[in-house]
Image (tube, helix red, strand yellow):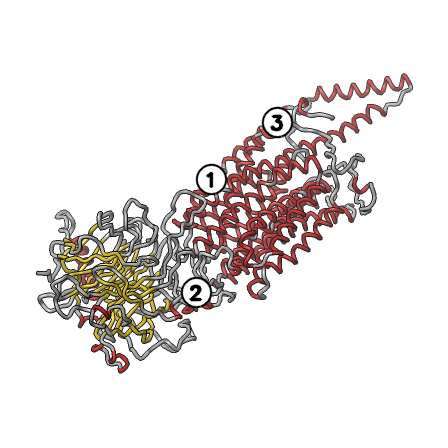
Amino acid sequence: MLLSSVALRTRRSSSSCSSFMCFFYLLSLLRWAISVEGTFEALEKIGKTITEPFPNSPRNIIGVGGLSYEPLTNTWTTSSENIAGVIDDLYPGVSLPKLNHMELDFNSGTITYINSEPVVVNPSNGLKLEDIASIPLTERSDEFFKQKDFWLVSEANSDVVKTNTFLSKNFGAPDLNTFDTETFITSRLIRVDAMTGDILEEATIPDFAQWNMEYDWESTHCVGDRPFQGLHALSIIPAALSNSPEDSQYQYLMFVGAQSSLFQDGDKSTEFSGSATRVLVYGLNPIEGEDKRLEPTATYLRSLRYDTSQLTMKSFQKGSRHFNALFGLLALDEKRFLFVECEELSSIGFSNHSAKMMNRIFYVEMDQNDALDGCKSLSKGNCPIEAPQKRLVWEREDTLEIDGIALGPTLDDGRPTIALTSENDDKIGLHIELFALNEQKLSEGQTWEVVDRKKTLLRQRQIAVWVSVALIAIIILSQHFVVRCKDAKKDSSNSTSSSTENVAFYKKYAIISAYLNSFLVGGVTFGYSGMVLILRKEGIYADNCACGSFCAKQKEGLALVSTVGFASAIGCRLFVGLFMDHYGPKLTSVICCSICFSGFLLLAIKNSSELEDIFMTAFILISIGGSGLHICGFHLTNLFNGDGKKKASAGISAAFGASSIIFPVMQMFNQFANISLQSMAIFYSVVVALVLVNNLFIQPWDKLTPRKHFRVNLQITSKDFWKRDDGSSFLSRSERKIDASLKTQMRQFEFYGEVCFFSLSLFALTHYLSTSTQIMYEKGDISFTNNPNNLNDFMISRMAGYLNGLGFLWVPTVKYLMTRYEWPPCFLLICILNIVVIGIVLLKNLEVQILGFTVLSFTRLLLFSTHHTFLLDRFGIGNFGTLNGISAFVAAILGFFSFPLQIYGLQIGYSVSYSLIGCGVVVSVLFPIILRKSISAEKKKETIEVDTKDAMEGKLNNQQLYGDIAKDSDKPTSEPARDDKSASKENVEVDEWVGTIHPSRDNVENI
């Protein structure tokens, strides 16, 4: 006999507790009990839960997707959850679709299998069984289940697609929107023989419910079900329970539920809106006779609307895997239904102890006359049929998802029962519970309020964006005013003239050209967030993605491009620097422009269908060429003196940062003007070609020094144009006035410490640029409409791209910091700001990320400006290209770790992966601290080595002696003075080549 009640045990309170605490405890317990009984009294747990953990050889049941009860024989049949390729040969048959016939004893919690081995569905290819239902037997047979048929529903599926192609470690289960194109099969509805598993019939699925595997930027332009989220639930009732005249010609009605919305019906459930899905209705007329079992019995009649609930579970971090969908349905008659929904927060690929789900059962009354067949889409405004009201009758937070529901045996007191089968993606095995159903209480369930927060949330984000823009504008304008006032005070107290005075026109044009080099070409690839949206619209790397989705496989492809591209852009500086130090800036800039031009040309000659094959190559070429051209401009800062040199360096870095707005601007033209990437690449190839020509004329063959005459020769046909300053051929190595020991400079703490600092800071920067779009998507920056071309969609991601490109607006503040303070405070500020950015990323709030973009844009400009100017100041121009290249090469090697971190982010979330980067940033704080001590020690040493009074008197006596000798011998005294003046000039020249850290005399040649 089945149990009819469950005893509720409570733990007795400690006798030592106070009366007040005991009263409070009992009151809380009473409130909890009232809440539970009042909400879920329609269902009552019966008996024990029946479990059989995996592995469970020889059955090898990895999970149960559905179950069916046969009252005449008091037996159960389960359909095994299976994903082709998910388990290796260690457990034979685990990935096969199969049935298991059994008897279940809920009093003892035991299973008795009827068949000696599972019944494998044949043919088994392309099946992922999710639910099972059958027509009850009318008479008992001597042979078990003779001529018994089962209907099975299989959701759209494919073989498992691993999202770590370039790594050996498996980071978790596949993304629901990623599928394998070769093995993809749309949803299927089949009837099989209970004993042999042979497929007897395959019902016709309406065309609108089958995906044609075409990808589109806008999901509502697609037709069909979603991979791994297609038809999922199944239930059969006698047609006599229906009052519809159309149904009277059938013996039974079969209801088939789609797990999530079809492509044309809009997006899946979000935090502010539920999602419409469909229930297909079939009429069944079973045909008796062994010879007629292969004849069709199912006829499609209509589809009904059901809306799944909005997301309700909260977490520290919103994951892109967070979704809610229909997992089961049970038809009590043609009007009354129980729907099972499961909201998964972090269960995909997670173990039981870390999974988090919310299972709910709703009671719904549906009108069979509200057919949807006249509605091509269920998105708002496209269909007049509203979803029926839902009542919550059961809810439980768990680590397992309810994957199937079926009617069970009737209790002795006349109450019907329902059985729930649970599974998850961590190989749970078999897990079945039984509940008594109080049908009279179903209509008393809590009405589920349909809360569409779309308009409220949209307004909230719009306000956040506009307020942020206003505040940023005020801050930027204020910095100009404050910095100008401070500069005016400084100029009034300083008698020296401005560094830009008396600079000839061509010198101004030269530094402007350096700015344009960095802006138009130098850092365009750092606007990668804009390019991501272009590639998504063009369908690049989307071959394995569900229509309109941003799937894990596409993220992996984009992550690889960004990682290799950024590493190439930074790492190539070693080779560019070495080449420039030996062959000069003109030849280097022309070659770099040519490389960048070839990258854009490659994009220009390939259309969208061919773009995927060459995009990475083109992106690498653009990255290398742009980064190299950017480096070629820093020697032009020698046109200025003192603080003017720092300001010019900051200007080049600002232009480099501003170039990251190029791709976001392209994205606007691509999305709203429908201009293809190919057309924009053609235009930009011309731009790069013009930059190449300009550098051919304006760049000198040899690097500039403060004492070198800067000349411009526009006579390209003359022989002099192709000669260096010393008259040698442009192909010969550039003349070097000094060869400061590279090894000596590399052994200085100021160099290797700054390399480590720069590498860690740049790694945090490039990783953020690579993942900003994905991070915003995780935190809820999704489309508010079904039209992704709407400006309201992905607004925070767009803003990230724009703010990243507008970092040049911080130039006044950066220039002020670099000229007002010494190096340690600047480096320390970079550390603090990086920590702030990482802290903001870890916050779950989406709107606050705008602050992160703003801080990052400032940090990026300060980092590059400080890095280049520090190398020039401390080590001079002599080995600048090589030293800068070495630091960039180290940063590039570290940058390759961005890819595994991004793949790791597919599993745990991108935000959490930043905690690892944060540890490195915290360690980098040591550099400015040690550097400050080093500079203080240098100052003390210089103070000790100041000439004493006796030394000064000795020098005066020597000068007087020279004067007396000259007077006596009638020889001029100008020679010693001329030598002193010449030596002074030469020393200035040497300082500009070797920097403020002077090498020993043994390491300096040709002085």
Residue 495 seen by the camera: no
User: What is the x, y in percent for residue 617?
Assistant: 57, 48
Mark nearer the viewer, 3 or 2: 2
Q: Is residue 546 left or right of residue 395?
A: right
User: What is the x, y in percent for residue 752?
Assistant: 56, 33
Compare marks 3 and 2 and give the one earlier in the sequence: 2
Q: Indicate whether 558 appears above or below 205.
A: above
- Residue sitting at x 21%, y 77%: 241
Name the residue tied to disc 2: 212
Q: Which mark is residue 744?
A: 3
Quadrant where the N terminus lies?
bottom left
Neighbour class for label 2 at 10 Å: few (<14), some, many (≥20)? some
Compare marks 1 and 3 and give the one earlier in the sequence: 3
Q: What's the residue type where badge 2 is placed?
A: Asn
The residues bearing labels 3 and 2 have C-alpha atoms spaced at a distance of 65 Å
Q: Indicate whether 387 appears above or below 97.
A: below
Quadrant where the C terminus lies?
top right
Secondary element at tag 2? loop
Is the residue under label 2 in contact with that under label 1 (CB below 8 Å)?
no
Secondary element at tag 3? helix
- Residue sitting at x 70%, y 45%: 590
- Residue sitting at x 12%, y 57%: 7
Q: What's the residue type where badge 1 is placed?
A: Gly
Q: Nearer the viewer, residue 389 or 626?
A: 626
Compare marks 1 and 2 and give the one earlier in the sequence: 2
Residue reaching furthest to the front: 291
Q: Is residue 969 left or right of residue 318?
A: right
Q: What's the residue type where badge 3 is placed?
A: Thr
Name the residue tied to disc 1: 920
